[in-house]
Image (cartoon, rainbow, N blue to C red):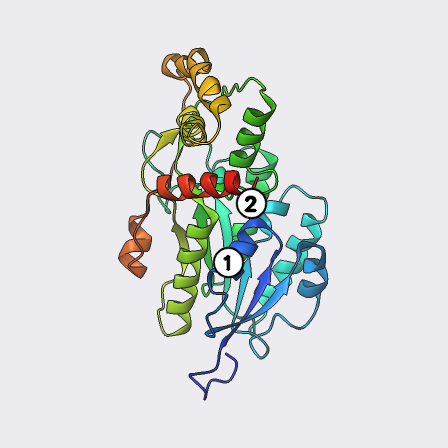
Amino acid sequence: MTKQNDINAPMKVVLLGSDTELGRAIRNYYDNDFDFDWLETPCDDVISIVSSSVLDSFYCDAIIDAYSLRSVTQDEYTEYLQLLEGVVARKACPPLYMLSGVQVFLGDKEASYLETDETDGRSRHAKRLIQAENIVLSSDSNIVLRTGWLFSGTQDDFVSNTINLVKKGAKIEFHDTAIGCPTPVTDVARVLLSVVKQRHYGALNTGIYHYCCSEEVSWMGLVEAVLTTSSQFDARAQNALENIGDTASALEMAVDVKRQSLSCRKIFNHFGIKQRSWRPVLRGLIKEMYQRA
């Protein structure tokens, strides 16, 4: 730990993937909190930072990986994993917090996934996330925080894409029969940084934790929630909402419904972190998006 004799010194945190949606949310959540001293590392610089000597407990107190969820399918991610394995193996490696996702599970369980459930995702995305998780968890001082369906309303985000389709007057069709828990990146930032702070000030819990917002919803139900709120600002959204009925009925007839939700009891029991609803955040986000337009 840096400056162990100064308990008032800010916590030095290396943020990998600071320019991702999650990275920006994490950095902005405590923008005026002097408990943190950030070394922001955009995706293009992650490989060079992980190759350097900066990721050492002499220089920093924690490492946050907001890079993996966005970059796991990129070609350079293989090199990142190789370098990460060396970093985690060092005795002087500070606690590492990796953000992962429900994608590591296949989705054929009838109940929400527990931290003890075996990861069985088969996609390339899932397999590489699982590989990264295993590297991070090879040290018992690290934490993997799995999340649900993330949304932020920026760039190629699902919420933003849906609203753009509404504005273009395009037909909206979604045939995915998954059920899960939408979770704003701002809520993930709140949860993660609470865990980081508690660990820094003495909490001993490590390993895998799950966090997503409360209330399961189907993918189609999430589309309907976006359109319902958007209809308050754009009449075209109401038309789109009325025209997705046939697509929505397909979910009721589906026999292969994937459940992509997570049980969050463990993080409440260990860190006192409660789930919040995603709906108020979604409504506020959509309102802001229309006000900016």
Q: Is residue 259 visible?
A: no
Residue found at x 40% / y 34% = 180
* Position in image of residue 161 (x %, y %): 57, 32
Image quarter where the C terminus lies is top right
* Position in image of residue 41 (x %, y %): 64, 62
* Position in image of residue 206 (x %, y %): 40, 61
- Going by the numbered disc 2, the residue's amino acid type is Leu
Residue found at x 41% / y 68% = 197
Residue 165 found in image quarter: top right
Residue found at x 41% / y 25% = 224
- Going by the numbered disc 1, the residue's amino acid type is Ile
* Position in image of residue 2 (x %, y %): 52, 81
Q: Is residue 164 visible?
A: yes
Residue 52 found in image quarter: bottom right
Circle 1 sits on which residue? 26
Labels 1, 2: front one: 1
